[in-house]
Amino acid sequence: MRNRTVKVDYLARVEGEGGILVKIKEKSITDVQFNIFEPPRFFEAFLRGRHYTEAPDITARICGICPIAYQMSAIHAMEHAFGVTVDGQLRALRRLVYCGEWIESHALHVSMLHAPDFLGYQDVIQMAKDHPETVKQALQLKKTGNELVALLGGREIHPINLRVGGFHRVPTHRELKLLADRLNRAREAALNMVRWTATFPFPDFERDYEFVGLRHEAEYPFNEGRLVSSKGLNIAVSEYENHFVEEHVEHSNALHCVLRERGPYFVGPLARYNLNFDRLTPTAQEVARAAGIAPPCNNPFKSIIVRSVEMVYACEEALRIINGYEPPARSMVELNPRSGVGCGCTEAPRGILYHRYRVNEKGIITDARIVAPTSQNQKTMELDLRHFVPDRLDIPHERLTWQCEQVIRNYDPCISCATHFLRLDFDGT
Amino acid sequence: MKKEKKPKLAVWKFSSCDGCQLSLLDCEDELLTIADRIEIANFREASRQVLRGPYDISLVEGSITTPHDAERIHQVRRASKFLVTIGACATAGGIQALRNFKDVKEFVSLVYATPSYIETLNKSTPIADHVFVDFELRGCPISKTQLIDVLGALLVGRKPTTPTYSVCVECKQRGIVCGLVAFGPPCMGPVTQAGCNALCPSYHRGCYGCFGPKETPNTSALASYWRGLGMKNDELLRLHRSYNAYAEPFRKESEAHEK
C-alpha cells in the first residue's frame, strides 16, 4: 500500500492566493482540492446602499487583471434594469475596449504565466534569456492591449472612463488612428504566438466537457448574446439563475458553481472558441486550423493556443472598429433610472461574468450578485486533477506536482475574482 | 572586477485585487531592464521560484483582514530591509475597509451559506497599523511611473520624488479647465493627493479620490462648498467613503455626514 500527496501550498503564476491538494491511496485518488485561501472582501455586501453609477468603478476593484469585464457586466446589468440599449459607435467602442483587455490579459497569461510551464522555466525572466525575441514581442503585444484600454478607459488598471450609458469622453478619430499601426504589428505578434505555442509539448489529456459561453447572432461574443453550451443549453442571460446554482464547500473561500441539470461545466477561451469558431475572422480560423486545433478541442492544455487565436481575433476586430469609427455626437445615451432588477453577462478573458442588481427609485443598489468565471470553473479544475493524476503516478514527484499546477493554470484562474462573491462572516472580535 | 550583487526584491500580497503588483508586470518596456538590475527573488504572481530572504526591497500589496495575515505581515517586516506599501489597500485598508463602518451585528444577521468555513477580522486595516512602513505609494491602482521612480531611487540611494500636493496642481500643469468651477461635477481633486496626472479631469470627469487624502487636506471646506451647491448628506458620505475610506481625513469627513 502506498500513500502519496501532491501538495502546492501557494500556487505561483496565477492571480490571487490558492493551493492544490491531491491525496492518492495506492492507485486511486481519495481527495482533490483546489484550495482558495484568499481572504474574502464582501463586494456584494457593500454594494448595497451605493448609487448605481458607482457599480462599474467599485466592481472593477474585484480584479486588477480584468477590470473592463467587471465594468462591462455592471454597466450592461444597469442598462438592462433601466431598459436602455446602447448601439452604434458607442457599442463599437465597448467592443474595442474589450479587445484591449483580452489582448493584455491573454498576452500576460500566454507569455508570462503559462508558456514557462511548457518549456520548463520558473518564470518569464528566465525564459527571456533563451527566447529574447519571443518575449519582447509578447511584451509589445501586451503593451498594445494596455494602450487600447488606457486610451478608451483612461488607464490600464481600474479604468475611469466607462459609465452606465456610455463613456465620459469618447476618443477622437486621430487618437484611434494612432493605434492602428501598433495593432497591425500586434496582429503579427499574435499570429507568431499561435505558431509558437502550437509547437509546445502537450500532455495527451481530453475530457468530455460541457462548454458554456455567450453566442451572438453575428459576432464573436464580448458583451451580448445568449448563453449556450455544447450540451444544448440555450437561454437568455436573464434566465441564468434558473439554470446555475452555487455551492459552498469547506476548503474554499469561493463558491462552486454548477449547472442545475448536469453539474460542472467549463467557461473561458476554450469554451468560447468551441462554441463560436464560425464567428472568428478568416485569418483567425485559418491559423487555428494550421495549429492543429480545429474545433472541437477538448484538451485544456491547448487553451494556450486558443488564447493566442483570440488575440489574433481581437487585433483584427479592433482594427475593423477603428477603421469604421466616426466619433458619436454624444458620449452617452440618455438614462431614466427607475427601480427594478437588471442582469448582465459578458465574456471576461477567463469566461462568462454574471452580474445582477436590484436598484430602487433613487438609483440606490439594494441587492447585488456577482458570479465570476473562476468560481464557475473551480469544480471542473478539480475534476481535471482527479482524471489527470491516476494515469501519471509513475512520473517523478516533482514533475507530477508541476504538471498538477499546470492543470490549474490551464484555466488562467483569477482567484481574487472567485473569492469576492462570498457573503459575510465575522469572528466577532 | 568583482560582480556586484543585485538587490533582492520581494512582492507580497494581502487582501487586494492584484492590480498594484500587476503594475510591475505592466512595465512592458522596463521589465527586462528592472530584472537586469534587481533580483526578483519572491514574486508569486510571476514566478515559481522563491529565493530566501532577507530582501532588500519588499513591495507589499493589500490590507490586513484575517488573523493569519496579521501575523504574516510581521514575518514580512522581519525579512525586509526596505518595506514599501503599494496601493490604497495597503496604505488605507482599501475598498474592503467599507466593512469598518458597519455594525457587525447587522452584517451577521444577513443570510450566508456556511459562515463557519470562513475566518475574517471585522476591520480591514492598512499595513502601517501593524508594522513600520518605510515608504508608501498611493493610488487605486498605483502609478507605474511612481513605482519605477521608487525602485530607481532605492537603487541609487536617492529620495523618491512622489509629490504630496493635490490633484489640482496637476490639472493646472496640464492646463485642464477646472470642472469644479466650470461645470460642477463633484471633484475630490482639491483634497486628493496627486500622482494620476489629473486623469479623471482630463476625461471630463470629477476626481473620485483614489490616491487618498493629500497632505493637510481641508475636506470640510470642500464639503460645505458642495453643500452650497445642493449636495445631500448621503452623497457627501459616499464621496468620502470609497477606495480610501479609512484614511483618517476622509473617514472623519464621511462621519460628519453620517447623521
Image (spheres, rainbow, N blue to C red):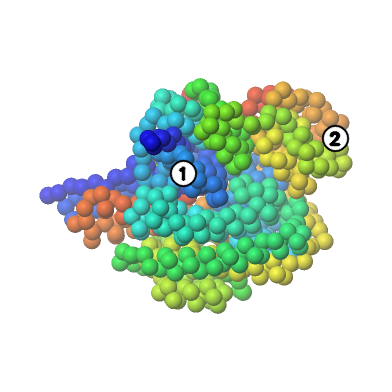
Residue B204 can be seen, yes or no:
yes
Residue drawn 61% across and 49% down? A156
- The residue lying toward the viewer, choosing from B80 and A50, is B80
Left or right of A144, for residue B59 = left
Kind of residue at disc 1: Ala
Kind of residue at disc 2: Gly
| Residue bearing the label numbered 1 | B35
Residue drawn 84% across and 30% down? B225
Q: Quadrant of residue B99?
A: top right
Residue drawn 59% across and 28% down? B159
Q: Can you give x and y, in whole percent of width and height, for residue A121 in the image?
A: 36, 52
User: What chain does mark 2 sit on?
Assistant: B
Q: Quadrant of residue B40?
A: top left
Tell me the tag on residue B230. 2
Residue drawn 76% across and 46% down? B202
First in residue order: circle 2 vs circle 1: 1
Q: Can you give x and y, in whole percent of width and height, for residue B34 in the image?
A: 50, 43
In the image, residue A305 sits, relative to residue A9, either above or below, namely: below
User: What chain does mark 1 sit on?
Assistant: B
Mark closer to the observer (2, 1): 1
Left or right of B237, for residue A32 = left
